[in-house]
Amino acid sequence: MEILNLAMTDKETTTAHGQSHRLVTGPARSGKSEWAEQLAQGLGLPVTYIATGQADIRDEDWMTRIRRHRQRRPNHWQLQEVAIDLPEAIAAAPAGCLLVDSLGTWTANLLPQSEAEWQAAVQHLLRALAQTRAQVIFVAEETGWGVVPAYPMGRQFRDRLGDLTRRVAITAQQVYLVTAGYAVDLKALGQPVTGLQ
Protein backbone atom coordinates (compact mmCIF):
# COMPACT_ATOMS: atom_id res chain seq x y z
CA MET A 1 0.00 0.00 0.00
CA GLU A 2 1.37 3.37 -0.94
CA ILE A 3 2.01 5.58 2.06
CA LEU A 4 0.03 8.79 2.02
CA ASN A 5 1.82 12.12 1.73
CA LEU A 6 2.63 12.99 5.33
CA ALA A 7 3.67 16.60 4.79
CA MET A 8 2.05 18.85 7.35
CA THR A 9 -0.70 21.03 5.93
CA ASP A 10 -2.70 22.09 8.99
CA LYS A 11 -0.96 24.72 11.11
CA GLU A 12 -3.43 24.18 13.96
CA THR A 13 -2.14 20.66 14.55
CA THR A 14 1.52 21.55 14.84
CA THR A 15 3.29 21.91 18.16
CA ALA A 16 5.21 24.89 19.47
CA HIS A 17 8.28 23.55 17.67
CA GLY A 18 6.44 23.16 14.38
CA GLN A 19 6.07 19.38 14.66
CA SER A 20 2.89 17.30 14.69
CA HIS A 21 1.44 14.07 15.94
CA ARG A 22 -0.73 11.30 14.53
CA LEU A 23 -3.01 8.78 16.19
CA VAL A 24 -3.64 5.22 15.02
CA THR A 25 -6.42 3.38 16.81
CA GLY A 26 -8.25 0.14 16.30
CA PRO A 27 -9.27 -3.19 17.83
CA ALA A 28 -7.01 -6.16 18.53
CA ARG A 29 -5.24 -7.72 15.53
CA SER A 30 -6.61 -5.03 13.23
CA GLY A 31 -3.23 -4.01 11.78
CA LYS A 32 -2.94 -0.77 13.75
CA SER A 33 0.65 -1.35 14.86
CA GLU A 34 1.70 -2.34 11.34
CA TRP A 35 0.05 0.79 9.91
CA ALA A 36 1.78 2.99 12.48
CA GLU A 37 5.09 1.40 11.52
CA GLN A 38 4.40 2.10 7.84
CA LEU A 39 3.66 5.73 8.66
CA ALA A 40 6.90 6.01 10.62
CA GLN A 41 8.93 4.57 7.74
CA GLY A 42 7.19 6.93 5.31
CA LEU A 43 8.35 10.01 7.19
CA GLY A 44 11.97 9.37 6.25
CA LEU A 45 13.19 10.38 9.72
CA PRO A 46 15.19 8.58 12.40
CA VAL A 47 12.70 6.50 14.37
CA THR A 48 12.64 5.76 18.08
CA TYR A 49 10.15 3.06 19.04
CA ILE A 50 8.75 3.66 22.52
CA ALA A 51 7.41 0.44 23.98
CA THR A 52 5.13 0.99 26.96
CA GLY A 53 4.66 -2.72 27.60
CA GLN A 54 6.95 -4.45 30.09
CA ALA A 55 8.48 -7.83 29.36
CA ASP A 56 7.26 -10.59 31.69
CA ILE A 57 8.95 -13.95 31.20
CA ARG A 58 6.15 -15.58 33.21
CA ASP A 59 3.66 -14.74 30.46
CA GLU A 60 4.64 -16.70 27.36
CA ASP A 61 1.83 -15.29 25.22
CA TRP A 62 2.86 -11.72 26.06
CA MET A 63 6.51 -12.49 25.32
CA THR A 64 5.48 -13.97 21.95
CA ARG A 65 3.68 -10.73 21.11
CA ILE A 66 6.75 -8.70 22.06
CA ARG A 67 9.00 -10.91 19.92
CA ARG A 68 6.63 -10.52 16.97
CA HIS A 69 6.83 -6.73 17.23
CA ARG A 70 10.61 -6.79 17.52
CA GLN A 71 11.03 -9.02 14.48
CA ARG A 72 8.85 -6.73 12.38
CA ARG A 73 10.70 -3.50 13.20
CA PRO A 74 13.72 -2.36 11.14
CA ASN A 75 17.01 -3.07 12.89
CA HIS A 76 18.17 0.54 12.68
CA TRP A 77 15.24 1.84 14.74
CA GLN A 78 16.09 2.81 18.29
CA LEU A 79 14.15 1.17 21.12
CA GLN A 80 13.14 2.85 24.35
CA GLU A 81 11.12 0.97 26.97
CA VAL A 82 8.96 3.39 28.93
CA ALA A 83 6.35 1.96 31.28
CA ILE A 84 5.42 5.08 33.25
CA ASP A 85 7.43 8.16 32.25
CA LEU A 86 6.01 8.64 28.76
CA PRO A 87 5.64 12.45 29.03
CA GLU A 88 9.29 12.76 30.04
CA ALA A 89 10.40 10.58 27.12
CA ILE A 90 8.42 12.68 24.64
CA ALA A 91 9.67 15.97 26.10
CA ALA A 92 13.30 14.84 25.97
CA ALA A 93 13.18 13.37 22.46
CA PRO A 94 15.33 14.93 19.73
CA ALA A 95 13.95 15.85 16.34
CA GLY A 96 12.86 12.74 14.46
CA CYS A 97 9.97 10.32 14.80
CA LEU A 98 8.65 8.73 17.97
CA LEU A 99 6.38 5.71 17.57
CA VAL A 100 4.55 5.08 20.86
CA ASP A 101 2.99 1.63 21.13
CA SER A 102 0.75 1.93 22.99
CA LEU A 103 -1.44 4.36 24.91
CA GLY A 104 -3.53 1.48 26.18
CA THR A 105 -0.60 -0.19 27.89
CA TRP A 106 0.53 3.14 29.36
CA THR A 107 -2.98 3.67 30.71
CA ALA A 108 -2.96 0.19 32.24
CA ASN A 109 0.39 0.86 33.89
CA LEU A 110 -1.11 3.91 35.62
CA LEU A 111 -4.38 2.31 36.74
CA PRO A 112 -3.33 2.31 40.43
CA GLN A 113 -3.24 6.11 40.37
CA SER A 114 -6.09 8.13 41.80
CA GLU A 115 -8.30 10.05 39.40
CA ALA A 116 -6.53 13.30 40.29
CA GLU A 117 -3.12 11.72 39.70
CA TRP A 118 -4.30 10.28 36.39
CA GLN A 119 -5.63 13.61 35.16
CA ALA A 120 -2.34 15.25 36.11
CA ALA A 121 -0.45 12.59 34.12
CA VAL A 122 -2.66 13.21 31.09
CA GLN A 123 -2.06 16.96 31.28
CA HIS A 124 1.67 16.30 31.58
CA LEU A 125 1.52 14.15 28.45
CA LEU A 126 -0.39 16.79 26.47
CA ARG A 127 2.04 19.52 27.52
CA ALA A 128 5.01 17.39 26.49
CA LEU A 129 3.33 16.68 23.17
CA ALA A 130 2.82 20.39 22.54
CA GLN A 131 6.50 21.14 23.16
CA THR A 132 8.32 18.18 21.61
CA ARG A 133 10.64 18.56 18.65
CA ALA A 134 9.72 15.10 17.38
CA GLN A 135 6.87 13.92 15.21
CA VAL A 136 4.93 11.47 17.34
CA ILE A 137 2.80 8.56 16.18
CA PHE A 138 0.58 7.04 18.87
CA VAL A 139 -0.97 3.60 18.75
CA ALA A 140 -4.12 3.16 20.85
CA GLU A 141 -6.54 0.32 21.42
CA GLU A 142 -10.29 0.56 20.92
CA THR A 143 -11.80 -1.04 24.01
CA GLY A 144 -15.25 0.56 24.28
CA TRP A 145 -17.12 -1.17 21.45
CA GLY A 146 -18.20 -4.19 23.45
CA VAL A 147 -20.24 -4.73 26.59
CA VAL A 148 -19.66 -2.65 29.71
CA PRO A 149 -17.00 -4.43 31.81
CA ALA A 150 -18.46 -6.21 34.81
CA TYR A 151 -15.75 -5.11 37.24
CA PRO A 152 -14.77 -1.58 38.37
CA MET A 153 -11.13 -1.67 37.21
CA GLY A 154 -12.19 -2.75 33.73
CA ARG A 155 -14.63 0.14 33.51
CA GLN A 156 -12.00 2.53 34.79
CA PHE A 157 -9.49 1.35 32.17
CA ARG A 158 -12.04 1.63 29.37
CA ASP A 159 -13.12 5.12 30.39
CA ARG A 160 -9.61 6.45 30.95
CA LEU A 161 -8.30 5.15 27.66
CA GLY A 162 -11.33 6.39 25.73
CA ASP A 163 -10.95 9.87 27.21
CA LEU A 164 -7.19 9.93 26.59
CA THR A 165 -7.56 8.79 22.98
CA ARG A 166 -10.19 11.47 22.33
CA ARG A 167 -8.00 14.20 23.82
CA VAL A 168 -4.96 13.15 21.80
CA ALA A 169 -7.10 13.03 18.66
CA ILE A 170 -8.35 16.60 19.02
CA THR A 171 -5.00 18.13 18.09
CA ALA A 172 -3.67 15.29 15.92
CA GLN A 173 -2.83 16.02 12.29
CA GLN A 174 -4.22 12.65 11.27
CA VAL A 175 -6.38 10.13 13.13
CA TYR A 176 -6.51 6.67 11.59
CA LEU A 177 -9.02 3.98 12.46
CA VAL A 178 -7.65 0.58 11.44
CA THR A 179 -9.90 -2.45 11.21
CA ALA A 180 -9.67 -5.72 9.25
CA GLY A 181 -6.34 -4.59 7.82
CA TYR A 182 -7.59 -1.30 6.35
CA ALA A 183 -6.80 2.21 7.60
CA VAL A 184 -9.22 5.14 7.33
CA ASP A 185 -8.19 8.74 8.05
CA LEU A 186 -11.04 9.98 10.24
CA LYS A 187 -9.92 13.60 10.07
CA ALA A 188 -10.09 13.54 6.28
CA LEU A 189 -13.47 11.82 6.07
CA GLY A 190 -15.22 12.55 9.35
CA GLN A 191 -16.73 15.46 11.22
CA PRO A 192 -15.61 16.39 14.74
CA VAL A 193 -18.15 16.00 17.51
CA THR A 194 -18.89 19.44 18.94
CA GLY A 195 -18.41 20.05 22.63
CA LEU A 196 -15.51 17.62 23.12
CA GLN A 197 -12.60 19.26 24.91
Image (spheres, rainbow, N blue to C red):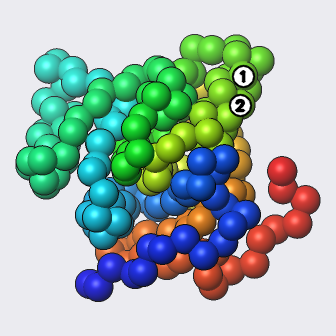
- Number of marks: 2
**28 to the left or right of 135:** left
Residue at the (55%, 54%) spot, across then down: 19
Percent of width and height locating residue 153: 60, 26
Q: Amino acid at mark 1?
A: Ala
Secondary structure of residue under mark 2? helix
Location of the N terminus (image quadrant): bottom left
Q: Nearer the viewer, residue 79 or 146?
A: 79
Residue at point 29% right, 85% down? Answer: 2
- The vertical placement of 116 against 63, above or below, is above
Q: Residue 36, located in which quarter of the rendered image?
A: bottom left
Q: Amino acid at mark 2?
A: Gln
Q: Which residue is mark 1?
A: 120
Q: Residue 123 — which label?
A: 2
Residue at 84% from the left image edge and 56% from the top image edge: 196
Tell whether 186 sits left or right of 41: right
Residue 194, label in figure: none
* Cβ–Cβ under 8 Å for marks 2 and 1: yes
Q: Point out residue 33 in the picture as x, y percentages from the top left corner.
A: 32, 57
Judging depth in this view, the residue of 58 and 66 nearest the camera is 66
User: Could you say where residue 96 lies in the image, as x and y percent from the top left?
Assistant: 37, 49
Q: Residue at x 73, y 63 (%)?
A: 12
